[in-house]
Image: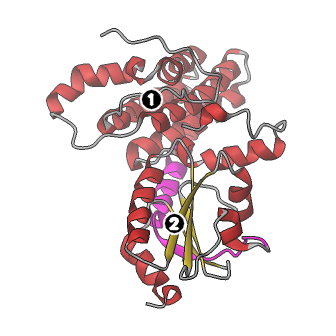
Amino acid sequence: MSTMGLLVLLGTLALATVAGLVLRARDGRVRAARGAAGPAGGWALAGHDPGEHDQVLLLQVSSPVCAPCRQTATLLTDLASRTPALVHVEVDAAEHPQVAGELGIMRTPTVVAFDRSGAELLRVSGVPRLRELESALAPALGA
Amino acid sequence: MSAPDIPPPPAGVPARAAEPPVDPRGVRFNAALTTVVLALVLLSGSGWLVAAQAVVFALGAFAGLRFAPYGVLFRALVAPRLGPPSTSEEAAPVRFSQTVGFVFAVVAAAGYLTGLTTLGLIATAFALAAAFLNAAFGFCLGCEMYALIVRFRSRFGPGNQHTRQGATA
């Protein structure tokens, strides 16, 4: 038996446990804006011009190999359909790596919210906790 | 069961062909068994054991999940005792994670078998961390990091934004 192997095994399991607990605690939580959308703002990144009544953009960065991305898309499509001033756009990180790069995104799904001027409001990685997201967006939606 | 032959896709690119959804409990079982095997690799320092695990990864990643050995074991031994699954999970992300595992296992086997033991240890540790996170927490690390991998590739790879179409399911 390899002593070094045993140490690496224990160390890896300990680190992975910490990483798992941190990931789980952060998953779906609303986090502060990082404000990295560039001069053009979120609407330009999404390739979507805000309509007359559009107040908030939810830009979802997804990958084709991601089960929680599908759940998030379903959740946000539904939210946008019952929130008139809210627009949901999903982009694929594989097709638009520059979007993920510009926003500094490491994980999929990550949802970044922008106000009408294109400035970042907040972001969420993992499947968003709906109530938390809704109440965080309420001021920007004028609700 | 006869299954159509799917040609193996290039490394790192999951097959485009739609596979039937899989039982999430099978995915966790697969990850748990992988965790145990990789832990044994670290303890024994056996290059052949991690090479065998690389073959296990390769079958799931390239031939299809229905050929993944641990999945076969799950369907034969575990699933019948559990009853029908209440949810299902898409196959593409799982297959992608097997591809990532395959890459690490191959590097680990090459390390151990050529005497680069440190390389073997490190590569096995990465694969173990990913398998453990999946088994214990349900996180698919390979899938979550996909955006990062793509960013890295687009920045440093040879202008290949449009040559990776196969990666877009």
Rendered residue at 57%/14% (across/down): B48
Q: Which numbered tag is attached to residue B42?
A: none
Nearest the camera: B115 or A94?
Answer: A94
Q: Is residue B157 left or right of residue B164?
A: right
Q: Position of residue A96 (x, y in %)?
A: 69, 51
Highlighted magenta segment, given as a residue range: A11-38
Instruction: Please state which of residues B155 and A2 is positioned toward the viewer in this rendering.
Output: B155
Residue A34 picture location, percent across and down: 67, 74
Number of numbered labels in the structure image: 2
- Residue A81 position (above or below residue B72): below
Residue A115, image x and y in percent?
61, 81
Q: Quadrant of residue B1?
A: top left
Q: Name the residue carrying label 1.
A: B18
Q: Amino acid at mark 1?
A: Ala
> Measuring 61% from the left and 75% from the top, which residue is drawn there?
A50
Name the residue tied to disc 2. A88
| Pointer 1 and pointer 2 on the same chain | no
In this rendering, position of residue A48 left or right of residue B91: right
Closer-to-camera residue (B20/A2) = B20
Whether residue A34 appears in magenta in the rendering, the answer is yes
Q: Nearer the viewer, residue B141 or A133?
A: A133
The answer to whether residue B100 is above or below residue B153 is above
